[in-house]
Amino acid sequence: MHQSGFYAWLKNPMSRRATEDNRLMALLKQAWLESSCVYGYRKLHDDLRSLGAVCSPNRVARLASLAGIKAQIGYKRKPGFYGGKPALVDDNRL
């Protein structure tokens, strides 16, 4: 790579697509944090559509993976915990 090409690249502003990606990524982070880090890209796409942003679900999935946004999958119990209290047995009165 020539030095002149590198410095020309430094001076160029970001492309329209890159600036739009940064704006959408900020909106995604905000919507994800408002959902208590639960929503995945499908519901985040619905939130962006309600805000008036125009983008496809695939783009939202790509930006979410770049930002490290993941859906919370289920609520797992502790291993060995089966729930409930132990049964109370009455005395044998026979």
Image: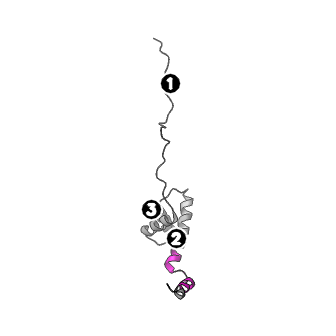
- How crowded pointer 3 is (Cα within 10 Å; few <14, some 14-19, many 20+) is rated as few
Q: Does residue 13 sit above or below 43 in this rendering? A: below
Residue 24 badge: 2
Residue 42 badge: 3
Q: Does residue 91 sit above or below 31 in this rendering? A: above
Residue occupying image coordinates x 49% and y 65%: 64
Q: Quadrant of the C terminus?
A: top left
Disc 3 from disc 1: Cα separation: 47 Å
Residue 36 painted magenta: no
User: Residue at the front extreme?
Assistant: 2
Residue occupying image coordinates x 51% and y 75%: 20
Residue 9 painted magenta: yes
Disc 1 from disc 2: Cα separation: 57 Å
Name the spot of residue 74 as percent of width and height, x first: 46, 50
Which comes sooner in the sequence, label 3 or label 1?
3
Circle 3 SS class:
helix
Which comes sooner in the sequence, label 3 or label 2?
2
- What is the chief secondary structure element of the magenta stretch? helix
Circle 2 SS class:
helix
Total marks in image = 3
Residues in magenta? 6-20
Give 92 or 51, whichever is nearer the viewer.
92
Q: Does residue 70 sit above or below 14 in this rendering? A: above
User: Residue at the bottom extreme?
Assistant: 4
Circle 1 SS class:
loop
Residue 88 badge: 1
